[in-house]
């Protein structure tokens, strides 16, 4: 029987309504339904490409990362505990940084942990957090985006390792500090100024665009840090950032 409402007995599982071959309807646990979908996909290898695309879409829909966490109202009937490292592993946050829809959320979570909770993390949790930071740095360097944000996170993580209150062996801390240094060098090389070809009076530059277009481009920046960095690049952009209140909404 499916759980209809929020109840202390609900384990967080999801039930779906399915129709069987004999035209009888019933409820199945989504985990079992996912396994059945995969088995059906293996048995239908000879179908046409359209059916294969539909099966792939269904599999990708059911395989979204998910982690059930009991936050409050713990009772004797509820047994279990979800650690931070287990939740991050189930949510696949290290590989989720490539998703533009999840990057900003992951970035905020990492900033809170690095700035406020680093000394409270266990060694295993810090390793998971550091793996996410490494994925963020590599993704930012490869796509040339969010460089300033990831660099700031990496610097604060590296400086936080100097605290005597961090958990883990000295060898682990030293290894993580060495990796931080290598990643900072990688960011420095990727953000080195590029030599541009000399512009002639006939060429149209970025700053020759209308003021409205420049303002629209600035409004697409993800956060205030990117706005401040853009203002440092040119006096025209600085004037736009300081005068346009719409950019700060």
Image (cartoon, grey):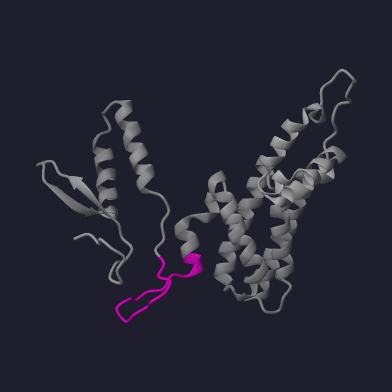
Q: Is residue 164 above or below residue 198?
A: below
Q: Residue at x 22, y 53 (%)?
A: 28
User: Dividing the picture into quarters, in which one does residue 21 lie?
Assistant: top left
Q: Residue at x 59, y 62 (%)?
A: 129
Tell me the quadrant of the picture where the N terminus can be found: bottom left
Nearest to the observer: residue 50 or residue 223: 223
Question: Which residue, as the protein is rendered here, is positioned at the far bottom?
Answer: 76
- Note whether residue 60 is visible: yes
User: 48 left or right of 242?
Assistant: left
Q: Is 84 inside the magenta-drawn segment? A: yes
Per the rendered image, the range of residues in magenta is 69-86
Magenta: main secondary structure equals loop
Residue 126 percent coordinates (x, y): 59, 67
Q: Is 5 inside the magenta-drawn segment? A: no
Nearest to the observer: residue 237 or residue 103: 237
Q: Residue at x 29, y 67 (%)?
A: 10
Residue 55 percent coordinates (x, y): 32, 37
User: Dividing the picture into quarters, in which one does residue 90 lie?
Assistant: bottom left
Q: Is residue 36 above or below residue 180?
A: above
Q: Is residue 213 above or below residue 182?
A: above
- Note whether residue 99 is visible: no
Residue 223 percent coordinates (x, y): 68, 50
Residue 149 percent coordinates (x, y): 70, 53
């Amino acid at each position: 029987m499916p759980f209809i409402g929020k109840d202390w007995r609900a384990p967080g599982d999801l039930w779906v309504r399915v129709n069987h071959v004999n035209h009888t309807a019933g409820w199945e646990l989504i985990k079992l339904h996912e396994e059945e979908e995969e088995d059906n996909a293996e048995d239908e290898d000879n179908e046409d490409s359209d059916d294969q695309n539909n099966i792939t879409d269904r599999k990708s829909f059911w395989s979204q990362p998910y982690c059930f966490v009991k936050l409050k109202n713990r009772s004797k009937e509820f047994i279990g505990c979800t650690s931070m490292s287990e939740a991050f592993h189930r949510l696949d946050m290290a590989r989720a940084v490539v998703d533009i829809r999840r990057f900003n959320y992951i970035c905020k979570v990492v900033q809170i942990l690095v700035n406020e909770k680093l000394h409270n993390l266990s060694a295993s949790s810090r390793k998971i957090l550091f793996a996410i930071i490494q994925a963020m740095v590599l993704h930012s360097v490869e796509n040339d985006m969010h460089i300033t944000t990831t660099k700031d996170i990496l610097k604060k993580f590296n400086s936080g390792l100097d605290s005597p209150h961090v958990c883990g062996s000295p060898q682990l801390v030293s290894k993580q500090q060495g990796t931080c240094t290598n990643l900072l060098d990688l960011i420095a090389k990727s953000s080195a100024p590029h030599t541009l070809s000399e512009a002639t009076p006939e060429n149209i530059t970025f700053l020759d665009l209308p003021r409205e277009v420049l303002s629209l481009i600035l409004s697409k920046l993800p956060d205030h840090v990117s706005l401040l960095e853009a203002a440092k690049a040119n006096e025209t952009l600085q004037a736009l950032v300081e005068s346009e209140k719409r950019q700060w909404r």
